[in-house]
Amino acid sequence: MDISKLEKNKVYIGFSRLKPNSLFNKFVYYSITFFSGGNVDHVFFLYYDYILGWCSVGALFSGLELLPIKQFLKDREIKYVFEPKYSGLLGILYINLQKIGTKYNYLAILGIALFLTFKKIKLFSKYYIKYFRRNFLSNPKELFCSQWVEKVILQWIKMLKDIKNIETSWSLSDIEPSLITPYMLLQTIETSTLFSKFDIN
């Protein structure tokens, strides 16, 4: 990825996958994509810190953390990057940086696996829409990557509507953030009018 193309006064949303350089990385990647589909297992914010340089901000297994991009790329490959078409997302991100250190929401990942399994096999199909739209295993005090990114995006969308009077549509708005996978978020951002794809090559 050519970091020099990025603008320092902007924030970007990136999608990545673990490099297959260890059995653990392979296991995690294939476990996540088996249930969610796609070729990504992580979503994060990419922004410029005037002390650390370009950084990723996202929920990894150690929790929500900020990492210099060079450190982040040791184990990860960035597949896609998107930039917002409207301003304000960087300010919303700054507000949410206070959550750095939040523990990783491990049980929610199991909840997603159950949710997607029920969906695929249409178990309890008659009651699925009504009762299985909530991740019962999610810990409200913890976060995983797409859950956190979705929460920040929703705050930004609300700001666009309330302050800038910009009417937007977001297909994931009726789904609990703790049920959203990185691939679901990727599919939504790719078709959204709020973001444009950034050439990372």
Image (cartoon, rainbow, N blue to C red):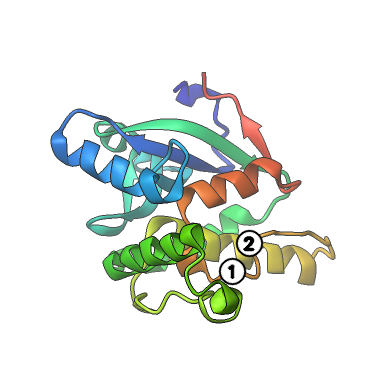
Asked which quadrant contains residue 50, the reply is top left
Percent of width and height locating residue 17: 36, 36
Amino acid under label 2? Leu
> In the rendered image, which residue does mark 1 sit on?
175
- Residue 181 lies, with reference to residue 104, above or below; the image says above
Percent of width and height locating residue 141: 35, 78
Residue 148 relative to residue 103: left or right:
right
Q: Is residue 180 visible?
A: no
Percent of width and height locating residue 18: 30, 36
**Which secondary structure, mark 2?**
loop
Amino acid under label 1? Ile
Name the residue nearer the viewer: 78 or 166. 78
- Residue 79 lies, with reference to residue 28, above or below; the image says above
Q: Residue visible at 19% across and 28% down?
A: 21
Which of the numbered marks, if any, corresponds to residue 172? 2
Percent of width and height locating residue 150: 54, 60
Q: Residue visible at 77% across and 59% down?
A: 169
